[in-house]
Image (cartoon, rainbow, N blue to C red):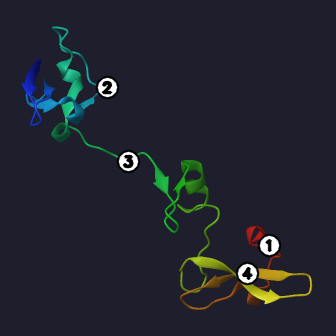
Amino acid sequence: TFLPSLGAVGMASVALCSSGGRLHPICDLFFCQNCKVGEDGDARQRLKGALEVVEELDGLACALCLEAIPSVEAELFGNRCARCFVCPVCGSYLQTAVSEERAEGEAYSFVCGHCEWDSAGCGVVADEAQSL
């Protein structure tokens, strides 16, 4: 069932009746694929208003950098992306920094901004930041 009406700016708008019996603008309705059509063939049983549905997000983000990650990567790395590392001392996010300058070039290591732990002390050093 739809009810044409005049909107606030004088444009025609359409309100549809949801399965709960309330009128909603089309933009506020959701279509339920799992709901069955009524016995009389009425498809209103599939229209749900915003108060009749539960929205859930279908996506994961890295807890450290908040970048979207696939679910397989989230399971492998404990809800972090493969590029984020945690300080073994305090649990803060590690950053990449130049640890020393050599004749061959710069050496990069992980540094904690909270407790000042440095991976160079453990021997974890690389010639390029992406190699860490």
Q: For residue 111, what is the image quadrant?
A: bottom right
Instruction: Name the residue beneath numbered marker 1.
Output: 128
Instruction: Name the residue beneath numbered marker 2.
Output: 34
Looking at the image, tell me whether mark 3 or mark 2 is earlier in sequence order: 2
- Between 76 and 68, the one lying in front of the other is 68
Secondary structure beneath disc 3? loop
Q: CA distance from mark 3 to mark 2?
A: 18 Å
Q: Is residue 93 left or right of residue 17?
A: right
Which residue: 61% across, 82% down? 88
Instruction: Answer above or below: position of 91 versus 7.
Output: below
* Mark 4 neighbour density, 10 Å: few (under 14) some (14–19) many (20 or more): many
Give the residue type at disc 2. Asn
Residue 109's tag is: 4
Instruction: Answer above or below: position of 98 versus 77.
Output: below
Asked whether disc 3 touches disc 1, contact meaning CB atoms under 8 Å apart, the reply is no
Secondary structure beneath disc 2? loop
Asked whether disc 3 touches disc 2, contact meaning CB atoms under 8 Å apart, the reply is no
Give the residue type at disc 4. Ser
Q: Position of residue 72 (x, y in %)?
A: 59, 49
Which residue: 79% across, 89% down? 100
Secondary structure beneath disc 4? strand
Q: Which quadrant of the rendered structure holds the N terminus?
A: top left
Q: Position of residue 125 (x, y in %)?
A: 79, 80
Instruction: Name the residue beneath numbered marker 3.
Output: 57
Asked whether disc 4 touches disc 1, contact meaning CB atoms under 8 Å apart, the reply is no
Q: CA distance from mark 4 to mark 2?
A: 52 Å
Asked whether disc 3 touches disc 4, contact meaning CB atoms under 8 Å apart, the reply is no
